[in-house]
Image: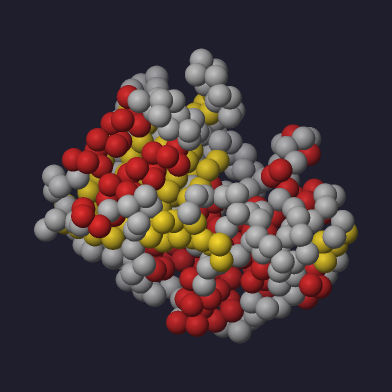
C-alpha cells in the first residue's frame, strides 16, 4: 500500500469553504474548526477560531483530535481483512467467537452474526444509552460494557431492523482480539495505520487519557442548550467506554489518506470491499444516510452523495466524507460539541461545508 500524500496545494479556489468555517465561529459559536480538502494529489487546509481558548493559538494541519465513531471504520476494516484471510467469516455467529457473552433480555449471540454487528442490524442495546451505569467507575473493560448492554432489552431480534449501537463495535473489537490473540490497537497499527504511514493516528491503550503529540484543546458544554452554559476542557479524557467504537485519535490529513486508500480499494480485496459498501437505510441517525460495514453514505441538499463516516465525542466532532472512488475528500473537525445561531448541532456545519464542496455546479477547479 502506498502512502499517497497530497503534494501540491489546491490554491485559492475554496473561498466558499473558508466562509463556512468562518461562519461556524462567528455565527455557530464553536471554539475552532479545521478542514482539509483533498483532490487527487492536491490539498487545501483551512481553519477558523482557535485551538486553545486561553493562548488563542490557531488550529494547525498537524493537530490531533479525538475522532469518535470514525473509529468504527478502522475496526471494520480490520475485521474485513481477517475475513479476507479466512480467519473468520462475516456470517459467523457472535456465539462462535464469544460464547455466552451476548445473552439475556432478548439478546442471542447464536442468532447474531458479525455482519449484523458491523451494519447495526443486530438489535443489541447500546451501552452508551445507559449513562448512569457508565458513571460508576473511572474505566471499563469491554466485557463490562457488554454486560451493561445485556442488562437492557434488545432493540429488536437480530436482522429485523436497524439501530445504531456502540456495543456492536465493542463486540467486534473483542472478536478481533479473540481471533488474533493480539490487542486491537496492535492490529489497527499493523494492518492499517502503519502501512499507510498514518503517524498521527492511533487507538489509545488502556486508560491513557492523554492525546499524544500536537493537538488542539477539546471543549464541552455537556449537551446543555443554554448559550451561557459553562464550558469544560476535556482534552484529557479516559475513553475506555468507547474503545473500538469511538476511542481513536487522528488528524485531518491522516483521515483523508485513510479514506482515499479505503475507498480506492487499497485496503480490502474486491469481495470485502463489496461487503463494506453494501448499505442499508438508517433510522434516527444522520439525515439522508445509509450504512454499510463501518462506513456510511450521506446525500447532501444538492443531491450529491458522499461516502465516509462521522464521529462525535465530548469536546470533538468530526466528519470525513468524499466521492465513492476516494479521489475527492473533505475531513473537518470542531474542537467543541455545541453550536449557536442557525445550526442545531455541528452536523449542520459539516453538511454545509460538504454541500459547498460537492454540489454538482461546484466541481473542483484546476
Q: Nearer the viewer, residue 165 or 139?
A: 165
Q: Residue at x 38, y 74 (%)?
A: 266
Q: How many marks?
A: 0
Q: Nearer the viewer, residue 313 or 59?
A: 313
Q: Is residue 345 visible?
A: yes
Colour scheme = secondary structure
Image x and y of residue 319, in percent: 42, 48
Q: Is residue 235 visible?
A: no
Q: Is residue 45 above or below residue 32?
A: below
Q: Nearer the viewer, residue 179 or 154?
A: 154
Image x and y of residue 247, in percent: 57, 49
Q: Residue at x 71, y 72 (%)?
A: 113
Q: Residue at x 25, y 42 (%)?
A: 17
Image x and y of residue 152, in percent: 82, 49
**Image position of 101 (left or right of 364):** right
**Image position of 159 (left or right of 55):** right
Which part of the image, by quadrant, shows the N terminus? bottom left
Q: Nearer the viewer, residue 283 or 255?
A: 283
Q: Which image quadrant for residue 93?
A: bottom right
Q: Residue furthest right?
A: 104
Q: Which image quadrant for residue 169?
A: bottom right
Image x and y of residue 53, in percent: 40, 22
Q: Is residue 202 above or below residue 45?
A: below
Q: Residue furthest left?
A: 366
**Image position of 177 (left or right of 226):** right
Which part of the image, by quadrant, shows the C terminus? bottom left
Q: Residue at x 39, y 19 (%)?
A: 54
Amino acid at each position: 500500500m502506498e502512502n499517497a500524500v497530497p503534494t501540491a496545494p489546491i490554491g485559492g479556489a475554496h473561498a466558499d469553504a473558508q466562509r463556512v468555517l468562518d461562519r461556524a465561529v462567528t455565527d455557530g459559536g464553536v471554539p475552532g474548526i479545521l478542514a482539509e480538502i483533498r483532490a487527487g494529489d492536491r490539498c487545501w487546509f483551512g481553519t477558523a477560531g482557535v485551538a486553545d481558548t486561553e493562548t488563542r493559538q490557531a488550529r494547525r494541519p498537524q493537530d490531533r483530535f479525538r475522532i469518535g465513531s470514525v473509529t468504527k471504520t478502522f475496526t471494520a476494516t480490520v475485521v474485513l481483512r481477517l475475513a479476507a484471510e479466512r480467519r473468520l467469516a462475516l456470517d459467523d455467529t457472535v456465539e462462535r467467537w464469544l460464547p455466552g457473552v451476548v445473552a439475556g433480555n432478548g439478546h442471542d449471540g447464536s442468532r447474531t452474526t458479525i455482519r449484523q454487528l458491523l451494519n447495526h442490524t443486530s438489535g443489541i442495546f447500546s451501552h452508551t444509552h445507559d449513562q448512569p451505569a457508565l458513571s460508576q467507575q473511572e474505566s471499563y473493560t469491554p466485557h463490562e460494557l457488554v454486560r451493561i448492554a445485556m442488562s437492557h432489552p434488545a432493540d429488536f431480534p437480530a436482522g429485523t431492523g436497524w439501530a445504531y449501537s456502540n456495543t456492536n463495535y465493542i463486540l467486534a473489537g473483542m472478536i478481533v482480539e479473540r481471533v488474533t490473540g493480539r490487542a486491537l490497537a496492535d492490529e489497527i497499527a499493523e494492518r492499517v495505520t502503519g502501512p499507510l504511514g498514518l503517524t498521527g493516528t492511533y487507538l489509545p491503550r488502556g486508560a491513557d487519557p492523554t492525546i499524544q503529540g500536537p493537538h488542539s484543546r477539546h471543549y464541552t458544554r455537556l449537551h446543555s442548550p443554554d448559550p451561557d452554559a459553562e464550558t469544560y476542557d476535556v482534552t484529557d479524557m479516559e475513553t475506555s467506554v468507547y474503545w473500538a467504537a469511538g476511542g481513536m485519535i487522528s488528524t485531518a490529513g491522516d483521515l483523508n489518506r485513510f479514506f482515499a486508500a479505503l475507498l480506492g480499494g487499497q485496503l480490502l480485496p474486491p469481495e470485502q470491499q463489496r461487503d463494506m459498501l453494501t448499505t442499508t437505510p438508517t433510522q434516527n441517525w444522520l439525515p439522508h444516510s445509509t450504512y454499510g460495514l463501518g462506513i456510511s453514505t450521506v446525500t447532501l441538499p444538492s443531491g450529491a452523495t458522499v461516502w465516509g463516516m462521522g464521529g462525535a465525542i465530548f469536546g470533538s466532532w468530526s466528519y470525513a466524507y468524499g466521492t465513492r472512488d476516494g479521489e475527492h475528500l473533505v475531513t473537518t473537525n470542531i474542537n467543541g460539541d455545541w453550536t449557536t445561531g442557525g445550526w442545531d448541532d455541528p452536523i449542520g456545519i459539516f453538511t454545509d461545508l460538504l454541500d459547498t464542496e460537492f454540489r454538482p455546479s461546484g466541481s473542483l477547479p484546476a
